[in-house]
Structures are given as C-alpha cells and as structure tokens.
Image: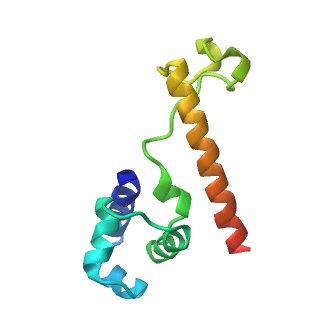
Amino acid sequence: MKHVGYNIRKSRLAKNLTQEYVAGVLKMTPAAYGNIERGASNVSLNRLQQIADILEVEPEELLHEKEPINITAPVNNSNIGNNQNNIIGLTEENFQLLNKTLEGVTKVLEKVIDKLK
C-alpha cells in the first residue's frame, strides 16, 4: 500500500510539516514514521486516523490510489462487458478486482466512521 504512504507524505509536505514533527505527535520514532511514508510498514486504521487528524485531511483522502476514475454510466454488474456500463479502459478482470477493492475500502471506511461516532 505504497500509495497510502505517498498520500501521507504529499499531505504532510502540503502542510509544511516535518517527519520529525508528525512522528513526535504520534509518539513514535522518525524512522518508524518514515517507514509508513515509504510504504515499508503497514498502518492501522487507528494510526491512519491519527495521521489524518494531524494533517487535517479525511482518512479516505489518504487511501486513494489515483485520481478519481471517470465513469461513463452507472455500473451495472449484469453488463460488466458492456462499456456503457463499465469504467473506461478496464477489462472485466480488472473491473472485478476494482469492485473487490472498493468493497474492502468501504468496509474500512465504515469502521473508521463507527470509531468517530
């Protein structure tokens, strides 16, 4: 999940914060925090929320892998092969993989929202 670390780094730099500062707020070593930004270590949901709070962003902003994907029409699972009901440029296999990934992200976000309540 290197994209998460990349997004954390990008958000930290946008706030003009150092790794040392963020690591200090998180009560961890700068080396351990650097591992998160490099994607060398996984980040828990709790830690992701803490980092998002420090960076003043929503946790889901840190989870996005790429720019939002353009959708030509609402997705209809019964017509996956039909480009009018599919995401531009995805094969059926990649579409299914994206669908599973989004389901997983949705579950993670639901847990984050529950913790925030």
Q: Is residue 30 above or below residue 75?
A: below
Which of the 4 quarters of the picture holds residue 96? top right
**Percent position (x, y) of residue 100?**
60, 38
The quadrant in which the C terminus is found is bottom right
Q: Residue at x 70, y 23 (%)?
A: 77
Q: Nearer the viewer, residue 88 or 1?
A: 1
Q: Residue at x 31, y 76 (%)?
A: 32
Which of the 4 quarters of the picture holds residue 25? bottom left
Q: Is residue 80 left or right of residue 21?
A: right
Q: Is residue 41 left or right of residue 76?
A: left
Q: Residue at x 51, y 34 (%)?
A: 69
Q: Is residue 95 above or below residue 49?
A: above
**Percent position (x, y) of residue 107?**
66, 53
Residue positioned most to the top: 82
Q: How many numbered discs?
A: 0
Q: Is residue 17 visible?
A: no
**Percent position (x, y) of residue 6?**
34, 56
